[in-house]
Image (spheres, rainbow, N blue to C red):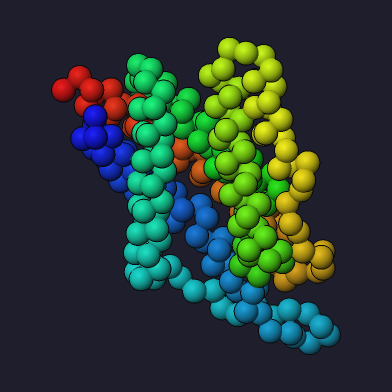
Amino acid sequence: MFRRIVLTAVLAGLISGVFLWATHMIKTTPLILAAEVYEHATPGAHGSVTPAAAESVGFERAAFTLLADLVSAVGFAFLLTAAVSFKGSPIDWRHGILWGLSGYAAFFLAPSLGLPPELPGMKAAALDARQIWWLATVAATVAGLGLTAFSPRRWVQALGLGLIVLPHLIGAPHPEITPGGVPAELAAQFAINVLVVSGLFWIVLGGLTGYFYHRFGNS
């Protein structure tokens, strides 16, 4: 069982990590570079903003992005594989996609309702407060989804739904709203791209996890 979990998590994580890196390079990294232009902008005549020249994606930046994506993907793969193993139900790539979508809901969608993806130069609340709310939201969503999906008792399912909603009733930390240098169109495009990229990543990760877990169980 240990070998099955490790092989599944490593292979699914590495493949989906490379996929995540490729989509980041195409869809989100160019927007981050564009935002950094505004982040380091200098005041121009009549109070206007004069952006600096945009930098291209260099080898070092691409390599560190790949490393970060691989580490994150393998880590998420271990969490997903452990959850699948704990549940103990038969699984294939189709069921794996459903597990992946659950991970997407818990680790991205739910936290993003309070803390949407941010570009460099955007106003944000204190890092400690955001991290605490993010962790609490993920934990509450994971627990809530588990109770709602796997318990046959209605009151337990209701408790699970309450856990999912609770962090949003409390509210995420937000800074005072002031004018920023990053154009709203750029921020909106980034948020949409991250939403799509993250969803595709979790679908790929879930499908690969289900496929490899099933395959190594039969070998």
Q: Position of residue 212 (x, y in %)?
A: 27, 29
> Which quadrant is home to the C terminus?
top left
Q: Residue at x 72, y 71 (%)?
A: 181
Residue at the far bottom: name it. Answer: 45
Q: Residue at x 50, y 60 (%)?
A: 29
Please tell me how many numbered marks the rendered image carries: 0
> Which quadrant is home to the N terminus?
top left
- Of 112 and 46, the residue lying toward us: 112
Q: Position of residue 157 (x, y in %)?
A: 65, 20
Q: Quadrant of residue 159?
A: top right
Q: Quadrant of residue 151?
A: top right
Left or right of 77: which side holds 108? right
Left or right of 11: which side holds 80? right
Q: Residue at x 42, y 31 (%)?
A: 83
Q: Position of residue 103 (x, y in %)?
A: 50, 36
Is residue 156 visible from the viewing direction of this image?
yes
- Residue 167 lies, with reference to residue 215, above or below; the image says below
Q: Residue at x 74, y 42 (%)?
A: 168
Q: Quadrant of residue 6?
A: top left
- Residue 32 lies, with reference to residue 95, above or below; the image says below
Is residue 8 visible from the viewing direction of this image?
no
- Residue 48 lies, with reference to residue 105, above or below; the image says below
- Of 147 and 180, the residue lying toward us: 147
Q: Position of residue 167 (x, y in %)?
A: 71, 42
Left or right of 53: which side holds 166? right
- Of 202 and 214, the residue lying toward us: 214
- Residue 150 lies, with reference to residue 125, above or below; the image says above
